[in-house]
Amino acid sequence: MNIKKIAEICGYSVATVSRVINDDSRVAASTRKKVLSVIDKYNFVPNITGRSLRTQKSNRILVLLPTMANQFYTTIIQGIEDTADEHGYATLVAVSNLEESKELKYLHMLRMNHVDGCISFFNTLDADYITQLSKKYPFVQCCELTIGAEVSHVVIDNEKAIYDVTSEFIENNHKTIAFISGNYYKYSEISRESGFIKAHLDHNLKLDKSLIVKSFYRYTDGAEAVKKIFSRDKTPTAIVCASDSLALGAISELKRMEINVGEEVMVIGFDDTSITEFYKPSISSVSQPRYELGKEAFDLIFQKLNNIDATNKKVILPHRIIHRESTGY
Amino acid sequence: MNIKKIAEICGYSVATVSRVINDDSRVAASTRKKVLSVIDKYNFVPNITGRSLRTQKSNRILVLLPTMANQFYTTIIQGIEDTADEHGYATLVAVSNLEESKELKYLHMLRMNHVDGCISFFNTLDADYITQLSKKYPFVQCCELTIGAEVSHVVIDNEKAIYDVTSEFIENNHKTIAFISGNYYKYSEISRESGFIKAHLDHNLKLDKSLIVKSFYRYTDGAEAVKKIFSRDKTPTAIVCASDSLALGAISELKRMEINVGEEVMVIGFDDTSITEFYKPSISSVSQPRYELGKEAFDLIFQKLNNIDATNKKVILPHRIIHRESTGY
DNA sequence: ATGAAAGCGCTAACAA
DNA sequence: TTGTTAGCGCTTTCAT
């Protein structure tokens, strides 16, 4: 069933049927009624491929994820989904596994008008590529950003988050604080580390660089980091982690070493994923407003969708520090 | 940049360029070389919308999820992704929130040739609809199935899983066993419950129906269920849960009641999501072979992709029972 | 080995 | 208010 057949059945032209479908006012009420009844009878729905080819629009957006295996993304996507739906856009999700070829493959859907825009999380593309891309296509970065790229984005203030966390520890008389993070040189990492360092500077606390341990974000990396850190003579009384998985690994290792987490050593994670609440001890964490991040990401892309030359906005949403047993609450 | 412009630049016809793109043998080696160099120079990639419109194929499949907020799906999707990629298919993921209108909206992409097939998890559509759909379009159900529908699917033997778990408890001398589950009347639920009942029958253990508590799958539901179960005089020494979230809630409530989980009361969950490993006590669970489920789901749809009349296959993959502290290991 | 032309389903400019 | 027609980018049949 296609528009041509419907037109034949109705006894009207294809154009008239198209007008009815698209709620064009230039069609007689009686005609509209007749056409609609036929459309209804045959359960006809216009072919989006044909329409896309013609209009160069798809009413779909793409969400490009580095991995599906992170519970952190789910609520954000819900925020995107809901907001997109309100504006008549469908949401498609694709996973890159941080392989550049896959990123390009999915981003290619933009050029094909197969999606009208893309909300991207962590990706491997360089600043120049992102800048050029976002000039031509609605493109928004969420939670993570490419340093130096001219593009709309929404993030939390990662630096301030870790600055606040670290400052709190310092103000509570912790003199030796460790920082466990990843080693991807991505924006969030760099900001968090610099927040850690800045807090030391501002509070005149000498920073021991060997207490900054960076590798990956697996929980085994958190455990390894603790082993390393506690093999020296001067051991920390607080550990700031750049993710919950790292905090989890760190805590499990501390438990194995029979160090009392929340009393002898404080530990805090990042992202407030559900594990933090259920673990024993429950894990303190920096919480990002996930649903709102998703909502804002869509709002940003919506502006670009309507006007690709809209100015790039850089939105910062507030985070919250949530204290649980691992920081003694 | 489109095929027409490329043709002009090359000095060949659109048809020839198309042949080069599609690796058609009927084109001179020298011509192919020339055309390819131009394609390369202008970084031309064919427009999929145009091609789809013409070929009625998209080389994409859709994965339809009830929700993003379940860590269980991520590995399965990875399995689908990887296998699809091997066969030149891209994977798109959409979320229905179990709203029928959204399910239909995304399923509509099939009719539009916007995706060539769909792998669906739990959905709300009835058997008849699914049967008809799968006659016309490559459609596969994964992990969950619509009872009575004629459609390819891949699942584990949910009944046997719970049968085995329950039997083990009985053989270890447990006389009073509770079962906490959901109340959606979906296949997996019904099978699991019947496995629970069958194990009692086969071992001549009288079943107390009031020990079967069904509501939702939130962890608070697990806690509520335990409250209810332990408000009677005859309390169980083992609890079989239809999900990890239920097990988690059940255990946390038992802990609150100062009942020693893993000694006084055994608890086992379902799906072996990451929480099970990290919780204290660590939670025993039935593990589904997630990556393989995804891989098999794609293999099934691939058969339908190549021949829509391929017979419907019902694949059952093996599960594993993983014992941890919550069952005394 | 190559090209011309039709047509996939739709929208929109122009005509009537 | 309605219809005619061109064309979005591509593949494929039929000619040559």
Image (tube, coloured by chain):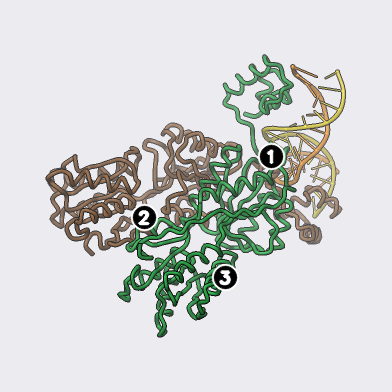
Chain colours: A brown, B green, C orange, D yellow
Which residue is denoted by mark 2 in the rendering? Answer: A288
Cα separation, mark 1 vs mark 3, equals 46 Å
Which residue is denoted by mark 1 in the rendering? Answer: B52
Q: Viewer-proximal residue, A177 or B219? A: B219
Dot 2 surroundings within 10 Å: few (below 14), some, or many (20 or more)? many
| Whether residue B73 is visible | yes
Cα separation, mark 2 vs mark 3, equals 42 Å
Image quadrant in which you'd find residue B277: bottom left
Compare marks 1 and 3 and give the one earlier in the sequence.
1
A107 relative position to A179: left or right: right
- Report the chain holding disc 2: A
Mark 3 element type: helix
Dot 3 amino acid type: Ser
Q: Viewer-proximal residue, B237 or B136? A: B237
Residue at 47% x, 45% y is: A65
Mark 1 element type: helix
Tag on residue B194? 3
